[in-house]
Amino acid sequence: MERPGHPDTPGGAQRFDHGILFDHARTARIGLPEAVFCEGKPADALADLLARFGRGSGRPVLFTRLAPEIFDAQPEAVRGSYSYHALSRTAWGEALPPKPRGRVAVVSAGTADGAVVWEAARTLEYLGIQRGVYEDCGVAGLWRIARRLEEINAHDAVIVVAGLDAALASVLGGLTPKPVFAVPTSVGYGMAREGMTALSSMLASCAPGVGVFNIDNGYGAACAAARVVNLLQQA
């Protein structure tokens, strides 16, 4: 049950069962609505939240890292009230209205990065932001990024997703004037070290002004790009 007025619920926050404290005033404060990181949360807590925030609730809430087996275990009526994407493990019942201005390109090195790519792309869609997805642009074949560059540069911000040596972030960071948000992924053999090598490579990039996010954090990069797009609405 909701317990508004609980002593530790300031600023529009509301506490629910299972100790989950929702920040419904976040949109007014920073322009980004509440999200639920599902990994590690008890299944019954997630079932309760999914039952509350489906289509028609009037409250946009994004669920990230929502495993297919958890979603598939929900009643048919609950599942039917959500837009769910298994690869990205994202779901929402209500999304934000489309923004009239601003587009974000999501560019990946390879299709193996797909889970992170689509977490970013789906987050942008949930936020009402137009996005273009450009997969398999890795620099082992430079022609792949070169042939998409004009399309990518037509966007207002760029999210780059790459594992292995993550060289795509530096290459694209030197080819586009748009804000670049780089996301290392945990994709790769041995010395890729579950994304640590990609993270180090992006942090050491010689391309100036590339922002780097945590390993596999497509959601975070999408929110950063959304802040750019939100500013465009005020121009």
Image (spheres, grey):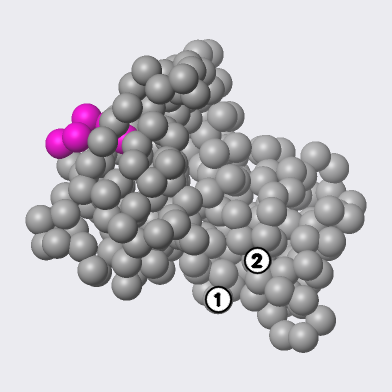
Q: Is residue 212 magenta?
A: no
Residue at position x 14%, y 62% in the image: 75
Residue found at the far left of this picture: 77
State the quadrant of the N terminus. Answer: top left
Q: Depth-wise, is mark 1 or mark 2 nearer the camera?
A: 2
Circle 2 packing at 10 Å, graded few (<14), some (14-19), many (20+), is many
Quarter of image, res 141 = bottom right
Residue found at the far bottom of this picture: 190
Question: How far across and down, in percent of the image, does residue 232 sit?
Answer: 52, 22
Question: How far across and down, in percent of the image, does residue 17 sit?
Answer: 34, 42
Circle 1 packing at 10 Å, graded few (<14), some (14-19), many (20+), is some
Q: Are marks 1 and 2 in contact (CB under 8 Å)?
A: yes
Residue 228 located left or right of residue 80 = right
Q: CA distance from mark 1 to mark 2?
A: 9 Å
Residue 84 located left or right of residue 225 = left
Residue found at the far front of this picture: 7
Residue at position x 44%, y 35% in the image: 21
- Provide the major secondary structure of the magenta segment: loop
Residue at position x 74%, y 49% in the image: 212
Relative to 197, does residue 35 appear above or below in the rendering?
A: above
Residue 68 located left or right of residue 58 = right
| Residue type marked 2 | Thr
Please state the extent of the stretch shown in magenta in the rendering.
Answer: 56-60
Residue of label 2: 185
Residue 121 in view: no
Relative to 81, does residue 154 appear above or below in the rendering?
A: above
Q: Which numbered tag is attached to residue 112?
A: 1
Residue found at the far top of this picture: 235
Relative to 8, does residue 152 appear above or below in the rendering?
A: below
Under tag 1, what secondary structure? helix
Under tag 2, what secondary structure? loop
Residue at position x 77%, y 77% in the image: 192
